[in-house]
Image (cartoon, rainbow, N blue to C red):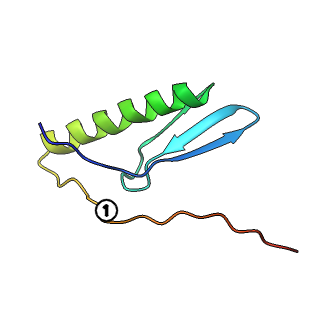
Amino acid sequence: MTSYKFSVVIEKDESGYFAHCPDLQGCYTQGDTYEQVLDNIRDAIHLHLVDRLADGEDIPQIEAVSFTTLDIAV
């Protein structure tokens, strides 16, 4: 069994939480709570990888990710 590491973006709005994996196009989900969306994106990534491997596709591996927040005055 091979282990992979992916970046995940989780956003919150008035409807709940939304998560996506930028490295895997079309891999996204939503949930009512942070914990639920985290479980859902983990499942979505797993299913995405299983499908890619079954189709003989490569699994992208990102070496480094940088994330920060910026204060912008307008």
Dot 1 surroundings within 10 Å: few (below 14), some, or many (20 or more)?
few
Which amino acid does the dot numbered 1 rest on?
Ile
Q: Nearer the viewer, residue 52 or 23?
A: 23
Which quadrant of the figure has residue 71?
bottom right
User: Where in the figure is residue 46, as x and y percent of width and height?
Assistant: 29, 35
Left or right of 57 on screen, residue 37: right
User: Where in the figure is residue 57, as x and y percent of width and height?
Assistant: 16, 52
Q: Give the quadrant of the C terminus.
A: bottom right
The residue depicted at 85 percent of the width and 73 percent of the height is 73
The residue depicted at 45 percent of the width and 28 percent of the height is 39
Which quadrant of the figure has residue 65?
bottom left
List the residue tagged with mark 1.
62
User: Where in the figure is residue 34, as x and y percent of width and height?
Assistant: 59, 31
Q: Residue furthest right?
A: 74
Q: Residue furthest bottom?
A: 74
Left or right of 66 on screen, residue 52: left
Q: Secondary structure at mark 1?
A: loop
Q: Give the quadrant of the N terminus.
A: top left
- Above or below, 27 against 47 in this view is below
User: Where in the figure is residue 42, as x and y percent of width and height?
Assistant: 39, 34
- Above or below, 4 against 65 in this view is above
The residue depicted at 79 percent of the width and 72 percent of the height is 72
Total number of numbered discs in the rendering: 1
The residue depicted at 48 percent of the width and 33 percent of the height is 38
Left or right of 3 on screen, residue 68: right
